[in-house]
Image (cartoon, rainbow, N blue to C red):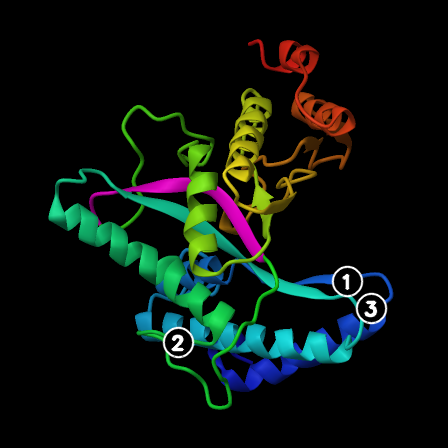
Amino acid sequence: MGAFERADNVAHFLRFVERVVTELGDLVEDWCTINEPNVYATFGYLLGRFPPGVRSLPRAVRVMTNLAHAHITAYELIHALRAGQPTRVTFAVHLRVFDPANPANPAHRALARAQEYLFQTALTEAMCTGRFGMPLRRPAGIHEGRYYDALGINYYSRSWVSTIGDGTRPGAQLNDLGWEIYPEGLARVARWAYDRWPAPIWVTENGTCDATDRFRAQYLHDHLEVMAAARATGLPFERYYHWCFVDNWEWAEGEVPRFGIVDLDYATLERTVKSSGRFYADVIAEGGVTDEIAARYLSS
């Protein structure tokens, strides 16, 4: 039926929202309406890398507009259905750091700003506030306001910008998908978002694909350390959700990337906790990384 290319389909999404909230409202207080709308729109309708494989700026803009419309109306509907009950509603946006490869190069700076705006700023602003900046257009019946109760941030990497598209800093450590491992970026995107849309910060996704489980424990440690340091500066981090529990089907890459702290044998479906999973469990049990935990899991 056209998915989120058609504004009429927002009504079907709202029927789904109403059913889920009505059925699960006695169990759930906090709601995330849409996960990574910018990734879905950009990779599915602009770059053509994800289904449905479209390469069209106007169609991508239409999808972004309708996703924002869907979130705003779902936000209002959830609060209306749960009037008088503790309720927080947000969405999860994939945020990246966009750094010019050469800060002294005006073209690099301009490209970094443009990619940041088109990938995350315009859509996040529309979903949070109802302000639809170019190239988005505000749908009829949508008004400016506040449509978020927390900031849901998915963070993985940064883009090293010298041309249109993702680049990586020369010599940087990369994960199995070629993404730069850049823990400091978690604090940077959180500050960037919080200064624009102040609210409690939930890290709704953070993790890495590491088929051999060689560096995931260190990755976890470093990002949690950055988050703790950022909290000390006043950023209100409330939650951290690791992505993910068990190896998953990853967008267009399928079963190849391994993001889980639990290994999944795709032939037998047997699950085995990885060393990084035991590290994470120990950190949770101890309330932090003790010297003993660090020596056991991070010494290599």
Classified by dominant secondary structure, the portion drawn in magenta counts as strand
Q: Is residue 161 magenta?
A: yes
Q: Is residue 149 above or below residue 165?
A: below
Give the magenta range: 151-163
Of labels 1 and 2, earlier in sequence is 1
- 26 or 209, which is in the foreground? 26
Name the kind of residue labelled 2 in the image: Phe
What distance separates the C-alpha of mark 3 from that of mark 2?
A: 31 Å
Relative placement, left or right, of 220 versus 68 is right
The outermost residue toward the right is: 26
Quadrant in the picture for the C terminus: top right
- Separation (CA) of disc 1 from disc 2: 28 Å
Which type of secondary structure does the marked residue at label 2 adopt?
Answer: loop
Q: Residue 277's image quarter?
A: top right
Residue at position x 60%, y 79% from top? 73
- Residue 47, visible in the rendered structure: no
Residue 126 x %, y %: 44, 71
**Residue underneath mark 2:** 132
Residue located at (51% from left, 90% from top): 141
Tell me which label, 3 or 2, sits earlier in the chain.
Answer: 3
The picture quadrant where one finds residue 196 is bottom left
Residue under numbered circle 1: 29
Amino acid type of the residue tagged 3 in the rendering: Gly
For the residues marked 1 and 3, what is the alpha-carbon distance in whole angstroms? 7 Å
183 w.r.t. 276: above or below: below
Label 1 vs label 3, nearer the camera: 1
Q: Position of residue 143 (x, y in %)?
A: 49, 84
Secondary structure under the numbered disc 1 in the rendered image: loop
- The residue that label 3 is drawn on is 25
* Residue drawn at point x = 87 percent, y = 66 percent: 26
Q: Residues within 10 Å of mark 3 (few under 14, many from 20)?
A: some
